[in-house]
Image (cartoon, grey):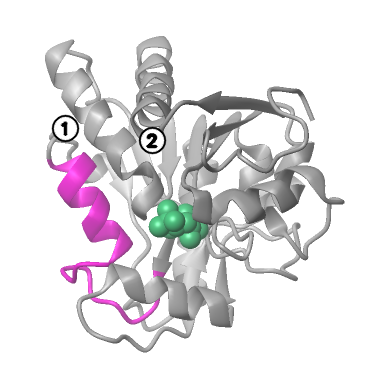
Amino acid sequence: MRVEIFKDYQELSDAAASAIINQVKLKPNSVLCFASGDTPKLALHKTVERAKKEDINFSRIFFIDLDEWVGIAPDEPGNCGNFFREIFLSPLKISEDQYHLFNGMATDLDQECKEMDEVILKKGGIDLMLVGLGMNGHIGFNEPGTSPELSSFVSLLDEETKSVGQKYFQGEKHLEKGLTLGFKHLMEARKVILMANGKHKSEIVRKALEEGISTTVPATILRKHDNGIVMLDEAAASILTHKEKDL
Ligand code: F6R
């Protein structure tokens, strides 16, 4: 896994946007899967800006969201699907048949996961995943202790995720469960970029990159991916012992 360090959040986001743009230029019908949240937000804005400016055709991509909160309606701010519709799918005019989003309001959540797995299989797997890093080392809602063998599943959220997750919502929300792609999908994706920025992520970045590989810090497992890249800003990389290296 390659580690790349950028001066600040702007430069980090430029690099992530370039990776998305290059992927789509290389393979216009790429299957893309992104995390929502604060980390990829600017990269997605930059992707949209560049796609419009450089006239890059996103109409043939297929998009999948990495995860979704259970019980948060699709039109609520903080709903992951809503995040993508607003900042990525609508601005790029990606039509409804070109994406599949988890429905966190579904009555049968296991069926929702099964459908996601079927879509991924039918589309021939994921070309590029862009994921963030939780304060507890989670990726998507793969919380500490989760089996790395899972496909999509209903996750029981960790206490830290329930409290950190409040930042996405306007009022206090009851967060118990999430729908998420599992590590099976992450490891099978043809390319995975893990992004992290800010001093507040430096300790978990250090654990993810320098501690032993185990489900205690789920992101450590990504180090086994053959085509994984970790993109950090200097603040997030500030307490790493070894910088700019292959892990
Ligand atoms: C969100 C997701 C989460 C976040 C992680 C970091 O869709 O998959 O795993 O990527 O919690 O969140 P931010 O980027 O808000 O710090």
Residue 120 percent coordinates (x, y): 50, 45
Q: Amino acid at mark 2?
A: Tyr
Q: Residue furthest right?
A: 212
Residue 58 sits in which quadrant?
A: top left
Q: Look at the image and give the residue range highlighted in magenta.
A: 69-90
Residue that carries the numbered disc 2 in the rendered image = 9
Point out the frontmost of discs 1 and 2.
2
Q: Give the vertical position of 2 relative to 241 (above or below).
A: above
Q: Nearer the viewer, residue 68 or 165?
A: 165
The residue that appears at 77% across and 65% down in the rendered structure is 216
Judged left or right of residue 226, residue 25 is left
Quick one: label 1 or label 2, which is nearer the N terminus?
A: 2
Residue that carries the numbered disc 1 in the rendered image = 92
Q: Nearer the viewer, residue 206 or 70?
A: 206
Residue 103 percent coordinates (x, y): 33, 68
Q: Inspect this view and state whether residue 124 appears.
A: no
Judged left or right of residue 156, residue 44 is left
In the image, residue 125 lies in the stretch drawn in magenta: no
Labels in figure, total: 2
Judged left or right of residue 209, residue 7 is left
Residue 206 percent coordinates (x, y): 70, 47
Asked if ligand 1 lies within 8 A of label 2, the reply is no
